[in-house]
Amino acid sequence: MLDSPDLIKEALWLALGSELGIRPAATGSLYFVDFENRIVLHPYGDRGMDVIAMRREALSDLYRSRDSWLLEHDMARMKTLFEEA
């Protein structure tokens, strides 16, 4: 269980290292799952991360506080989902 920020940071570096040319590295995909809040994070290299949730409310704060990080190609869909609320 990764309940420490230091362990999470190490796991991220291992997972992203192979794509970024950093060693040591691990192959495969990494998913962080918060079962209580029903959120899944999937970092995929220096390009970003997918954030998936079972409830729109779980993502609303991220949408508003990290809007400058959001990818433009998904912006129309995100505006439809989050700006109606």
Image: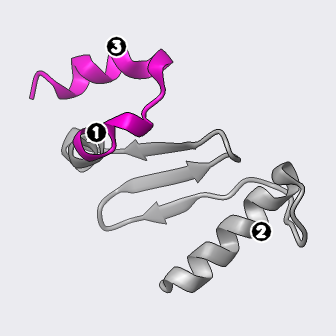
Q: Quadrant of residue 63?
A: top left
Give the residue displayed 68% in from the left and 72% down from the top. 11
**Can residue 20 be spotted in the picture?**
yes
Overall secondary structure of the magenta section:
helix
Q: Earlier in the sequence, mark 2 or mark 1?
A: 2
Instruction: Residue type at mark 3: give it.
Output: Ala
Give how far apart the Cα atoms at labels 2 and 1 are: 27 Å
- Quadrant into which the N terminus falls: bottom right
Q: Does 7 sit left or right of 5 as displayed?
A: right
Q: Which residues are magenta?
A: 63-85
Task: State the residue in front, 30 or 5.
Answer: 5
Q: Which label belongs to residue 14? A: 2
What amino acid type is highlighted by mark number 2? Answer: Leu
Q: CA distance from mark 3 to mark 2?
A: 33 Å
Per the model, the C-alpha gap separating discs 3 and 1 is: 13 Å
Q: Which mark is residue 18?
A: none
Residue drawn at the location 20% of the way across and 28% of the way down: 82
To which residue does mark 3 refer? 76
Please provide percent x and percent y for residue 9. Answer: 61, 74
- Residue 1 seen: no
Number of numbered discs overlaid on the protein picture: 3
Mark 1 falls on what kind of element?
A: helix
- Residue at position x 50%, y 81% in the image: 5
Residue 8 sits inside the magenta stretch: no
Q: Residue at x 37, y 19 (%)?
A: 75
In the rendered image, the vertical position of residue 71 relative to residue 80, given as above or below: below
Q: Please provide percent x and percent y for residue 42.
A: 58, 50
Q: Quadrant of the C terminus?
A: top left
Which residue is denoted by mark 1 in the rendering? Answer: 63
29 with respect to 32 (left or right): right
Residue 43 lies, in percent from the top left, at: 61, 51
